[in-house]
């Protein structure tokens, strides 16, 4: 599993620099790490493969989340 302490976290440009209500993501060795920006380093981290992340983004863009 990737080491989250060495990750470079980034927020979506859509959230703006002042919004604390968003997620941050980081790419690490074939994985994507996701955390809550409000909690920063104290946030639990969701880890998915790059393929899973791309599948999620594709489903979001297609509005096909199966709900």
Image (cartoon, rainbow, N blue to C red):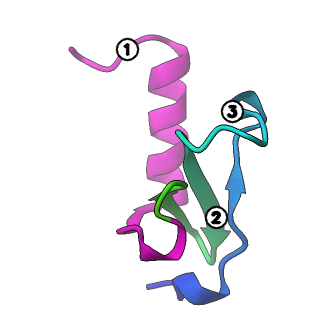
Say which of 67 and 8 sits in front: 8
Query: Is residue 66 toward the left or the right of residue 10 in the image?
Result: left
Q: In terms of secondary structure, where does tag 2 sit?
A: strand
Q: Is residue 40 above or below residue 22?
A: below
**Which of the two marks, 3 or 1, is nearer to us in this view?**
3
- Write the residue at 66% across / 87% down: 6
* Magenta run includes residue 53: yes
Q: Is residue 34 above or below residue 60?
A: below
Q: Is residue 8 above or below residue 38?
A: below
For the N terminus, the quadrant is bottom left
Kindly indicate the quadrant of the structure image that contains residue 48.
bottom left
Please give the residue where the numbered disc 2 appears in the rendered image: 26
**Which of the two marks, 3 or 2, is nearer to us in this view?**
3
Asked whether the residues under the numbered discs 3 and 2 touch, taking CB atoms below 8 Å apart as contact, a structural biologist would say: no
Please give the residue where the numbered disc 3 appears in the rendered image: 15
**What span is colored magenta in the figure?**
40-67
Q: Which mark is residue 21?
A: none
- Between the residue at mark 3 and the residue at mark 1, the CA separation in whole angstroms equals 23 Å
For the C terminus, the quadrant is top left
Please give the residue where the numbered disc 1 appears in the rendered image: 64
- Write the residue at 73% across / 28% down: 14
Say which of 39 and 27 sits in front: 39
- Between the residue at mark 3 and the residue at mark 2, the CA separation in whole angstroms equals 16 Å
């Amino acid at each position: 599993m990737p080491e989250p302490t060495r990750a470079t976290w980034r927020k979506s440009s859509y959230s703006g620099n002042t919004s604390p209500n968003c997620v941050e993501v980081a790419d690490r060795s074939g994985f994507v790490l996701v955390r809550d920006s409000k909690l920063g380093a104290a946030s639990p981290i969701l880890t998915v493969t790059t393929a899973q992340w791309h599948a999620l983004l594709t489903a979001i863009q297609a509005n096909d989340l199966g709900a």
